Amino acid sequence: MHYAFDAELWIWDARPDEGWTFVSLPAEASDEIRDRTGGQRRGFGAVRVEARIGTTVWRTSIFPDAKQGTYVLPVKRAVRKAQKLEPGDRARVAVELISP
């Protein structure tokens, strides 16, 4: 499954000084991913994905965020730097589920 969407980068409230930056997947995509991956989730409900922002592609996991009711994608510093992104910026994001 492949999902593409625009999202704002935000910093995790629990550790704001550490700069953990994420984007939230849309609710509809999150619901579909949850339904499709019920038996394939890893620790913390993580789902393996290949992600793309701009020209940067990387493999990581998305995680369920109970507060928002969606999955969140961590956007590592190297990606933000390569794409010249800061928290608060909007980016075109693509994620594709990776089979376990």
Image (cartoon, rainbow, N blue to C red):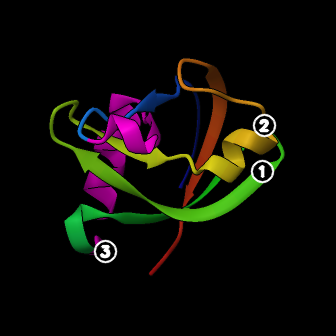
Whether label 2 touches label 1, CB < 8 Å = yes
| Residue 6, x across and y down, in percent | 59, 24
Pair 2/3: label in front: 2
Q: Amino acid at mark 2?
A: Gln
Q: Please tell me which residue is depicted at 41% across the width and 45% down the height of the picture.
A: 18
Say which residue appears at 26% left-offset and 54% top-offset. Answer: 35
> Residue 88: x and y, percent?
54, 18
Crowd tier of the residue under label 1, counting other residues whose Cα lies within 10 Å: few below 14, some 14–19, many 20 or above: few
Q: Name the one closer to the observer, 33 or 65.
A: 65
Q: Residue 96, image x and y in percent?
A: 58, 56
Q: Is residue 33 visible?
A: yes
Numbered tag placed on residue 56 in the rendering: 1
Tell me how far mark 2 sits from mark 1, CA to CA.
7 Å
Relative horizontal placement of residue 5, taking residue 28 as reference (left or right): right
**For numbered disc 3, what is the local secondary structure?**
loop
| Near-viewer residue (26 or 87) | 87
- Picture quadrant where residue 20 is located: top left
- Please name the residue that numbered disc 2 is placed on: 83
Dot 3 amino acid type: Gln
User: Which residue is found at the position 62% from the left and 27% from the top?
Assistant: 86
Helix or strand or loop: what does disc 1 sit on?
strand
Residue labelled with disc 3:
40
Q: Earlier in the sequence, mark 2 or mark 1?
A: 1
In the image, which residues are magenta? 15-42
x then y, percent, for residue 25: 43, 36
Q: Residue at x 58, y 51 (%)?
A: 76
**In the rendered image, which quarter contains the C terminus?**
bottom left
Number of the front mark, 2 or 1: 2
